[in-house]
Image (tube, rainbow, N blue to C red):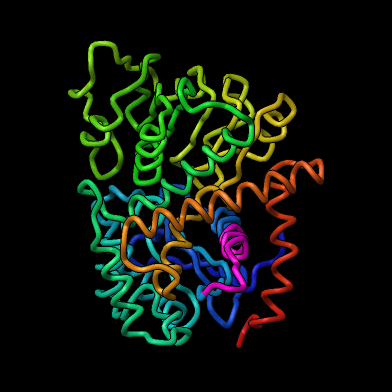
Amino acid sequence: MTTPLMSLTWTDHVTGRRGFLVVDQLVRGVSSGGLRMRPGCTLDEVASLARGMTMKEALHYNPEGRYVPLGGAKGGIDCDPRDPGAYELLVRYLRAVRPYIESLWTTGEDLGLTQDLVDRAAAEAGLVSSIQAVFPLLDDEAAARRRLADAFAVEVDGIGLDGLVGGCGVAESALTALDLAGVPYAGTRVVVQGLGTMGGATARFLTRAGLTVVAVGDIKGTISNPDGLDVEALLAARDVYGTVDRAVLRPGDLELPADAWSAVDAEVLVPAAVSYAVDTVNQERITARWIVEAANMPVLPEAEELLTARGVTVLPDVVVNSGTNAWWWWTLFGDIGPDADEAFTHTRRSMRALVEQMLARARADGTTPRAAAHAIVADRLPVIAERFGWYR
């Protein structure tokens, strides 16, 4: 990994807990990347995520588009989001890093945090917006901010559009891989580990495409049914952390241990919860032909090597889960309007083209999809730098 442009560690004067900010790279003086909160969060983890954001931004570069990719950054706080003092800690962190958010880091929700919570804490910390650093780059700031606010107000089946576009992108990534392999949707089984915003939306889109979700995992354990789960019922019974109320389970649904998701027979596995969920031990139990990384860094590099050796294709997070971030900027810069159908159509088209390009590059180079994604980024970064510059 290259050395990031800027890296800092903050220590909370009240609790002693630590927070981190890593700016991997700037484009036009601005970077983009979410803020996560989880117990055990580390500077190295945040640095890896920030580098991933640089890649996600570059992968969505379209010379004809209004959205110009930004640099990559990431924030993290070492705290359980369920802790009674988590919100106050979040506000203090945002106050501490306020100068960076005002000038060069645009941020939003990530693991453990919702956008509503980030927005409320940002306002309390004295910020205009968690993405205010990008405002000077907009042709018409008022119209752009109104467009994004209108998009966040859109709901589909009672769920905010912002909570669906990422899962739409993950699902389209999986469907593209199936199409290229000539595998029909009907009869294709899916396991989704993590039923939060990203995992839940992915499960919904894959089910509606005709695939069968046979297992989901949450913090309480694994719910499985070889004949297929009632995904809509499970989603409706989630709490804000993605934990399913077991009262909605049907007679044929099985309650299995927390780590059982890795051993459920399926063609597609979608790890959509925490980082490092697939390790060198549990990878041996995975039967899936494709692992579609909805979470950030869910497969350890050593595990990915072993999976690749036995013919499992890992579709990497830097491509697969990049749809949410791209949707923010497509909307803000005006490539799309605040409309659900337009958002889903644009997301599907963009993700399908990106996955097809990545898999074609992997075949041509004789490498993994992740290596191919890195190669595409390496080609694009100098082009972006030449056109826009890192700092201006």
Q: Does 59 lie within the magenta span? A: yes
Q: Position of residue 27 (x, y in %)?
A: 60, 77
Q: Main secondary structure of the magenta part?
A: helix
Looking at the image, residue 312 sits to the left or right of residue 378; the answer is left
Q: Is residue 372 rendered to the left or right of residue 55? A: right
Q: Within the image, what quadrant is residue 309 found in?
A: top right
The residue range painted magenta reads: 51-65
Task: Using the image, determine if residue 362 lies above or below residue 262.
Answer: below
At 26% from the left and 54% from the top, the residue drawn is 160
Residue 151 placement (x, y as % from top left):
30, 65
* 379 or 246: nearer the viewer: 379
**Number of numbered callouts drawn:** 0
Answer above or below: position of 357 versus 193: below
Picture quadrant of residue 213: top left
Q: Is residue 189 visible?
A: yes
Is 180 included in the stretch rendered in magenta?
Answer: no
Image position of 236 with respect to 18: above or below: above
Quadrant the N terminus occupies: bottom right
Q: Residue furthest left?
A: 247
Q: Residue 258 lies in what quarter of the image? A: top left
Whether residue 145 sits left or right of residue 330 in the image: it is left
Q: Which quadrant: the C terminus? A: bottom right
Which is more toward the observer, 121 or 374?
374
* Residue depicted at 26% across the width and 61% down the height: 116
Q: Position of residue 76 (x, y in %)?
A: 46, 59
**Extreme-top residue of the structure:** 252
Which residue is depicted at the point 60% across and 64% down? 54
Left or right: 35 in relation to 44: left
Q: Residue at horizontal 50%, vertical 50%?
A: 321
The one of 77 and 180 positioned closer to us in this rendering: 180
From this viewpoint, is residue 275 visible? no
Give coordinates of residue 356: x percent, y percent.
64, 47
